[in-house]
Amino acid sequence: MNGRVLVVDDDPSVREMLAEYLGGHGYEVAQADRGTAMREAVEASLPDVVLLDLNLPGEDGLSLARFLRERFDVGIIIVTGATGVADRVAGLEIGADDYVMKPFELRELLARIKSVLRRMQARAPAAMTVGTATPLGRAMVGACTLDTLSHQLFAADGHEIPLTAMEFDLLKVFLDHPNQVLTRDQLLTLTRNREWEPFDRSIDIRIARVRRKVEADPDKPQAIRTVRGAGYVFVPSRRDGGS
């Protein structure tokens, strides 16, 4: 089995189509037509990836995406006919890993599912060299500690901060390239997200969300800084072993 996918959509024809197609490619597929059914399905057997429609009866998809991100380590791909940019931005800010518009090509959706699963399953092969004062496999990022082996982010008081696969990839890339200005295109390449366009502003949205998690003052970022007209740079603090 390649993975378990939960399809959350109120259109039975869409659910059946995706179940048949993904099932034919080696995925175990569960279905839900609304929020209550999704919650029951997740509690019964946690999926690897949730394909989530936004326009659902009762509880809307954005609220469900927030529920999933706050409680479970699952990939979230919003699949919807909503065309507004605001919906896309809201979904990404909540923590969705990707966003696919209806109507969509099944092959493209499959590729995006595989991409999300690769990011979730990837594991750092060795401890980071940045943050030498932290335990093996851990590194300081702003006000937080990133465990590169377990893909967990911890606040200064020790509590875990939910982290999406894409957010981990971004932090890992920054840790691997301290004090180096990285363009959006480089970030997309290094995080293996070449299915996005180089100038897709989604990368800015995700970095803004990461900053809210790791910066002491997200409005005045010190760890992940913007270099106007160039890109972003990770600046380790002195306690992290940086300059």
Image (tube, rainbow, N blue to C red):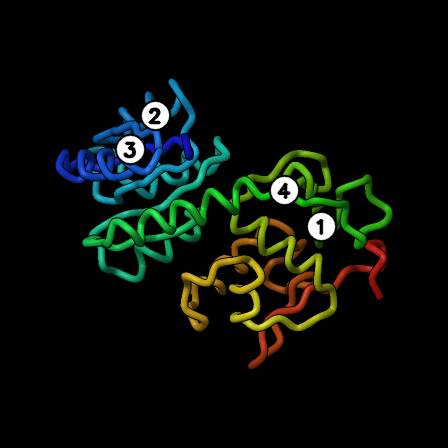
Q: Residues within 10 Å of mark 1 (few under 14, many from 20)?
A: some
Give the percent coordinates (x, y) of residue 67. 41, 34
Q: Nearer the viewer, mark 1 or mark 2?
A: 2
Q: Amino acid at mark 1?
A: Ala
User: What whole-number distance in Å separates the C-alpha atoms at marks 4 and 2?
Assistant: 28 Å
Residue beneath the point at 37% across and 51% down:
111
Q: Are the residues at dot 4 and dot 2 in contact (C-beta closer than 8 Å)?
A: no
Q: Residues within 10 Å of mark 2 (few under 14, many from 20)?
A: some
Which residue was labeled with disc 4? 123
Q: Nearer the viewer, mark 4 or mark 3?
A: 3
Label 1 secondary element: loop
User: What whole-number distance in Å separates the C-alpha atoms at marks 1 and 4?
Assistant: 23 Å
Is 105 left, or right, of 6 in this rendering? left
Q: Are the residues at dot 1 and dot 4 in contact (C-beta closer than 8 Å)?
A: no
Q: Along the line of sight, which residue is nearer the eye, 122 or 141?
A: 122
Disc with the residue nearer the chain's start (4 vs 2): 2
Q: Amino acid at mark 4?
A: Arg
Disc with the residue nearer the chain's start (4 vs 3): 3
Q: Are the residues at dot 2 and dot 3 in contact (C-beta closer than 8 Å)?
A: no
Residue beneath the point at 62% across and 76% down:
227
Which residue was labeled with disc 3? 23
User: Considering only vertical position in the picture, is 168 above or below 196?
Assistant: above
User: What whole-number distance in Å separates the C-alpha atoms at marks 1 and 2?
Assistant: 33 Å
Which residue was labeled with disc 1? 143
Q: Amino acid at mark 3?
A: Gly
Which residue was labeled with disc 2? 39
Residue beneath the point at 21% across and 33% down:
58
Q: Quadrant of the C terminus?
A: bottom right
Label 2 secondary element: helix
